[in-house]
Amino acid sequence: MKQEAGFLLVMAGIYLFAIMPRTGRRANKMKGVFYAHRGLHNKKAGVPENSMTAFRKAVNAGYGIELDIQLTRDDEVVVFHDFDLKRVCSAEGEISDYTYEELQSYAIYGTEEHIPKFSEVLEAVDGRVPLLVEMKYKGLHSRICEKADEYLKNYRGEYVIESFHPRALWWYRRHRPEVCRGQLSMNFQRQEGNYHPLQLAARCLLFNFLGRPDFIAYDIRDRNAVSKNICRKLFGCPCAAWTVRSRKQLEKARTCYDAFIFEGFFPAK
């Protein structure tokens, strides 16, 4: 019995060490902030996601902005969510297959909007609202972090970064430890049918030991996720909910999250 109890204590210790966020520093400035998911977009009104118009509308409304960045073939940092162009631009191939100039021939959802450069977005926002920048980390190289940081290190506005990929947080931990970083996660098994062991570990935040995040950004559909709640309640780690799509969802999430990434309605700031 004693051996079993001892084994369980050791395993519990390993688990807590693995999921533990960064200690001694908290992303308190995030608490209570509402981030417009991919800008304040409205497809029916002709304002597509991750577009310059959507970002300007978020700034004018006083909301923070959540956006996604990745690299083109010629290493330009652009703002775009999907790795491929099919859903948003009705085109074949991936962002990384094209140069920035080549991508300008594709419209976003058939509007007059085109895929913007990250630098253009930073210039337009100009520090007026906080930014939540998701690194679309692809493969095993850290090029997106390096290139994005060339712009962010000179940006005077408030921002934090986040990623599903723990290697992105690991890069920031090593090279830019002063930047607030967040680990994105979700129940990959229930929501996507992905039962790969690495995805199960990611769902349980077992890679936190690599990046030691300052905050957790977790799918609102999984507000009772055990590891997320342990990070929040035991370690005092702020948690951001994505994506809140109604006032009803927001009210349910308030007891489980500290910041909110929203779309489809206007939450009270």
Image (cartoon, helix red, strand yellow):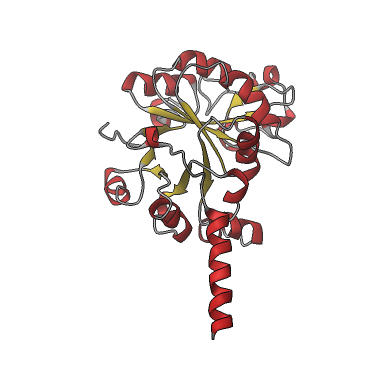
In this view, the residue in front, 111 or 191, is 191
Q: Judge from the rendering whether residue 143 lies leftward or rightward of residue 61; answer left or right.
A: right
Identified at 32% across, 49% down, the residue is 253
> In the rendered view, would you say 222 is above or below 264?
below
Identified at 63% across, 38% down, the residue is 168
Please identify the residue farthest to the bottom as the structure is shown.
1
> In the rendered view, would you say 96 is above or below 13?
above
Identified at 57% across, 30% down, the residue is 80
User: Residue 235: percent from the left, percent from the top?
Assistant: 43, 51
Locate residue 94: give its quadrant: top right
Residue 133 visible, this angle:
yes
User: Residue 58: percent from the left, percent from the top?
Assistant: 38, 24
> In the rendered view, would you say 256 is above or below 39?
below
User: Residue 161: percent from the left, percent from the top?
Assistant: 53, 33
Residue 116 visible, this angle:
no
Q: Judge from the rendering whether residue 104 lies leftward or rightward of residue 159; answer left or right.
A: right
Locate residue 106: give its quadrant: top right
Quadrant in which the N terminus appears: bottom right
Identified at 56% across, 16% down, the residue is 154
Quadrant in which the C terminus appears: top left
In this view, the residue in front, 10 or 79, is 10
